[in-house]
Amino acid sequence: MKQNIGIWIDTKQAVIIKLSNNDHHSIKKIESNIVMRERVEGDSKKFGRFGNQYLTYEKNRLNRRTEQTNQFLKNLIKEVEMSDSIVLFGPAKMKKIFEKAIKSNMQVADKLVGVFNSELITENQMVAWVKDFYKKRN
């Protein structure tokens, strides 16, 4: 049974739309848990002092966000490993980051069929967009 997947991806969440041969679909939402605006205690200084070393809170925040993004992308790749083809669409730059993650993973690299820009749309519009994309492709 062929399974086509469309993923609408943003920094906050990803909506995975799975289509099967008999035109049935299922929708799954995955939250990213990426903290965009984080308030850290002691945020007034631009650096912290630990013995003779100076720490920058900016680096800590950037590293934390990078790790959260990587974890989000790993969760998405686990969801789409068993699919036959994948199409990405969404408004943010996260789709380009996810495209790089897919291309670096050998199991799913050849399954990616396209990356497209899209606006913030409703779930029904997402499902219609994915169905229309795969009908035009076949």
Image: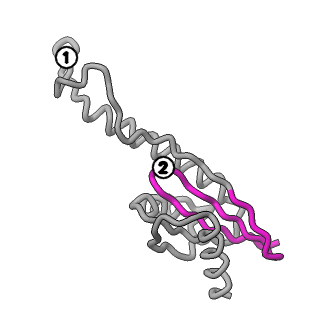
Q: Residue at x 60, y 71 (%)?
A: 125
Q: Residue at x 64, y 81 (%)?
A: 132
Q: How is the image coloured?
A: one colour
Which disc is residue 1 wearing?
none
Which disc is residue 49 wearing?
1
- The answer to whether 95 is drawn above or below residue 63 in the figure is below
Q: Position of residue 26 (x, y in %)?
A: 74, 62
- The answer to whether 3 is drawn above or below residue 135 in the figure is above
Disc 1 versus disc 2: nearer the observer: 2
Q: Nearer the viewer, residue 65 or 122?
A: 122
N-terminal of the pair, mark 1 or mark 2, is 2
**Disc 1 residue type?**
Arg
**Disc 2 residue type?**
Lys
Q: Residue at x 83, y 76 (%)?
A: 22
What's the CA distance linking mark 1 and mark 2?
Answer: 33 Å
Q: Position of residue 39 (x, y in %)?
A: 33, 29
Q: Is residue 14 magenta?
A: yes
Question: What is the secondary structure assignment of the residue under circle 1?
Answer: strand
- The answer to whether 123 is drawn above or below residue 77 in the figure is below
Residue on which the image places disc 2: 12
Quadrant for residue 51, please give it: top left
Whether residue 50 sits left or right of residue 7 in the image: it is left
Q: Is residue 15 magenta?
A: yes
Could you classify mark 2 by the number of other residues whose Cα lies within 10 Å: few (under 14), some (14-19), or many (20 or more)? some
The magenta stretch is 1-27
Could you classify mark 1 by the number of other residues whose Cα lies within 10 Å: few (under 14), some (14-19), or many (20 or more)? few
Q: Nearer the viewer, residue 111 or 89?
A: 89
Q: Residue pushed farthest top?
A: 51
- The answer to whether 91 is drawn above or below residue 41 in the figure is below
Quadrant for residue 119, please give it: bottom left
Q: Residue at x 32, y 34 (%)?
A: 61
Q: Nearer the viewer, residue 122 or 86?
A: 122
